[in-house]
Amino acid sequence: MTLSLETVANNTASRIVSRGGRATRTRVAVLDILSRAGRPLSHDEVGAALDSGAVEHDRVTLYRTLDWLVTHELAHRVAGTDRVWRFNAGVDEGHGHAHFHCARCGTVFCLEALQPTIAATLPQGFRCKRAELSFHGTCPNCVGSPSEP
């Protein structure tokens, strides 16, 4: 069964409304872009995708939209080694998987199958909401390239 674009947009809008937000055109478009990307995207990459889909936006609205999606756990952000935040749609509830940063091409990959665990017991009074795990190296596309770091 293939879902229509209207069905996808309605599902995305429903997710936003379920978190107490208004399903604006920009929020729906950004969450849809992040959901389909398959990897975390930078602000500029999301902006370019909005442009290619003829969704009017400005940089401030996009920043606010991404921040809202992260705050309401519909997306998560990860800092790249280049100090650029990248965003990915949340999978199920919350965020709990590892990331891989390619030193060659700069791409950040979500490693859904690798779940960070807390190896040590936290001291009394501390409560962990999430753990982050990042790997750094060379992705399959860059392995063996002449300028591999």
Image: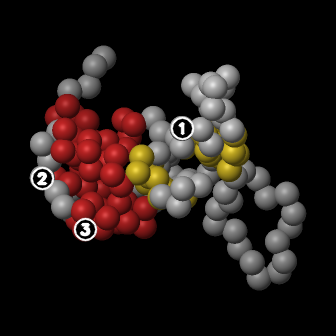
> Given the image, on which type of amino acid does mark 2 rest?
Glu
- Determine crowd level at label 2: few under 14, some 14-19, many 20+ residues with C-alpha closer than 10 A: few
Could you say where residue 93 lies in the image, as x and y percent from the top left?
A: 51, 52
| Residue labelled with disc 2 | 56
| Residue labelled with disc 3 | 60
Tell me the quarter of the image containing the N terminus.
top left
Frontmost of labels 3 and 1 is: 1
Q: Is residue 15 above or below residue 60?
A: above
Frontmost of labels 2 and 1 is: 1
| Residue situated furthest front in the rendering | 146
Taking the spot 20% from the left edge, 27% from the top edge, the residue there is: 4
| Residue labelled with disc 1 | 105
29 to the left or right of 149: left
Q: CA distance from mark 2 to mark 1?
A: 29 Å
Q: Earlier in the sequence, mark 2 or mark 1?
A: 2
Could you say where residue 143 lies in the image, as x and y percent from the top left?
A: 66, 26
Q: CA distance from mark 3 to mark 1?
A: 27 Å
The quarter holding residue 129 reads: bottom right
Taking the spot 62% from the left edge, 51% from the top edge, the residue there is: 96
Q: CA distance from mark 3 to mark 2?
A: 12 Å
Could you say where residue 44 lies in the image, as x and y percent from the top left?
A: 33, 51
Q: Secondary structure at mark 3?
A: helix
Q: Secondary structure at mark 2?
A: loop
Could you say where residue 39 lies in the image, as x and y percent from the top left?
A: 48, 39
Taking the spot 31% from the left edge, 64% from the top edge, the residue there is: 63
Residue 74, label in figure: none
Residue 113 visible in this rendered orientation of the protein: no
| Residue situated furthest top in the rendering | 1
Taking the spot 39% from the left edge, 37% from the top edge, the residue there is: 37
> Given the image, on which type of amino acid does mark 1 rest?
Cys
> Given the image, on which type of amino acid does mark 3 rest?
Val
The quarter holding residue 50 reads: top left
